Amino acid sequence: MTARPRPKTVFSTELRRVCPRCGWPIADCRCAQTREDAVPARLTARLRVERAGRKGKTVTIVDGLPRNAAFLKELAAELKRACGSGGTAGETWVEIQGDHCTALRELLRVRGWVVKG
């Protein structure tokens, strides 16, 4: 038997707030909770260069990182400073504007990470 998704609440006399995405009470909502992973001692990062969906602009992506917002924000700031370009931190990746594969590969290897790609 398959589990059917719970329908969204249309009207409720309860005083509790309801999540607009999933329809569950805020205290029980699973879609709003962001899971934070611990940063392991040994990381494996995957490098790739993308141009698709960016109007022809090239970005270098460091992927395969743990889901930890504070760690990714700090890493993005350090990599942007080292490359002298802009970028952003995503959910499990860091984007650096431009083609900086060789520079990023060396920076991450100095940190003791395994770099693929």
Image (cartoon, rainbow, N blue to C red):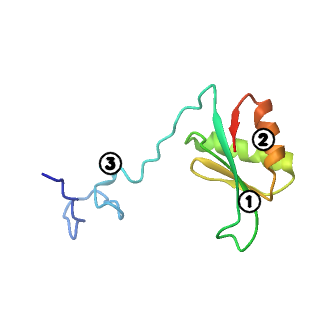
> In the image, 34: left or right of 4?
right
Q: Earlier in the sequence, mark 3 or mark 2?
A: 3
Residue tagged 3: 27
Q: Nearer the viewer, residue 52 or 92?
A: 52
Q: Earlier in the sequence, mark 1 or mark 3?
A: 3
Q: Earlier in the sequence, mark 2 or mark 1?
A: 1
> Any mark on residue 105, and which?
2
Does residue 96 lie above or below 44 as drawn? below
Q: Amino acid at mark 1?
A: Val
Q: CA distance from mark 2 to mark 1?
A: 14 Å
Residue 115 is situated, as x and y percent measured from the top left of the image, at 70, 37
Residue shown at 84%/47% (left/top)? 81
Residue tagged 1: 59
Q: Quadrant of the C terminus?
A: top right
Does residue 24 lie above or below 107 as drawn? below
Q: Nearer the viewer, residue 96 or 44?
A: 44
Q: Amino acid at mark 3?
A: Ala
Residue shown at 74%/28% (left/top)? 112
Q: Nearer the viewer, mark 1 or mark 3?
A: 1
Q: Amino acid at mark 2?
A: Arg
Residue shown at 30%/48% (left/top)? 28
Question: For mark 2, does the 10 Å Cα neighbourhood hold few (<14), some (14 to 19), or many (20 or more) residues?
Answer: some
Seen as rendered, the residue at the extreme top is: 41
Q: CA distance from mark 3 to mark 2?
A: 43 Å
Seen as rendered, the residue at the extreme front is: 117
Q: CA distance from mark 1 to mark 3?
A: 39 Å
Residue shown at 57%/50% (left/top)? 91
- Report the number of numbered marks: 3
Does residue 36 lie above or below 21 as drawn? above
Task: Give the structural element (helix, strand or loop) at label 2.
Answer: helix
Residue 1 is situated, as x and y percent measured from the top left of the image, at 12, 51
Q: Are marks 2 and 1 in contact (CB under 8 Å)?
A: no
